[in-house]
Image (spheres, rainbow, N blue to C red):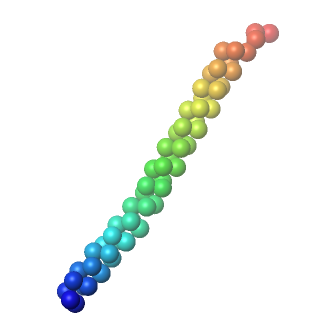
Amino acid sequence: MFATAFALLISFSVSVALVSWAAPITAQAISLDVQKSIDGWQLRQTVSDALNREPK
C-alpha cells in the first residue's frame, strides 16, 4: 500500500518537474513561431504594397 502511494508520488513529482522545465521552452518556441508568422506576413504586405504602388 505504502509502496504504491510512494511510487505514485514520485511519478507525479517527476511529471510536475518535467512540465515545469518544458513549459517555458515550449512557450518560447510558440511565441517565436508566432513572431516569425507575423514578420512573414508584414514582409509579404510590404512587398505587395511596393509592387502595387503607382509610379509617380
Q: Residue at x 64, y 26 (%)?
A: 45
The quarter of the image holding the C terminus is: top right
Q: Give the vertical position of 45 relative to 14 (above or below).
A: above
Q: Give the vertical position of 1 relative to 17 (above or below).
A: below
Pick out the residue farthest to the front: 1
Q: Give the vertical position of 26 relative to 15 (above or below).
A: above
Q: Give the vertical position of 1 relative to 8 (above or below).
A: below
How far from the left and from the top, in percent, is residue 27?
48, 55
The quarter of the image holding the N terminus is: bottom left
Left or right: 28 as drawn, with respect to 14: right
Q: Residue at x 21, y 83 (%)?
A: 4
How far from the left and from the top, in percent, is residue 53?
73, 15
Pick out the residue farthest to the right: 56
Is 6 or 52 nearer to us in this picture?
Answer: 6
Numbered label tally: 0
Q: Residue at x 60, y 26 (%)?
A: 44
Left or right: 33 as drawn, with respect to 56: left
How far from the left and from the top, in percent, is residue 48?
64, 20
Pick out the residue farthest to the bottom: 2
Q: Quadrant of residue 15?
A: bottom left
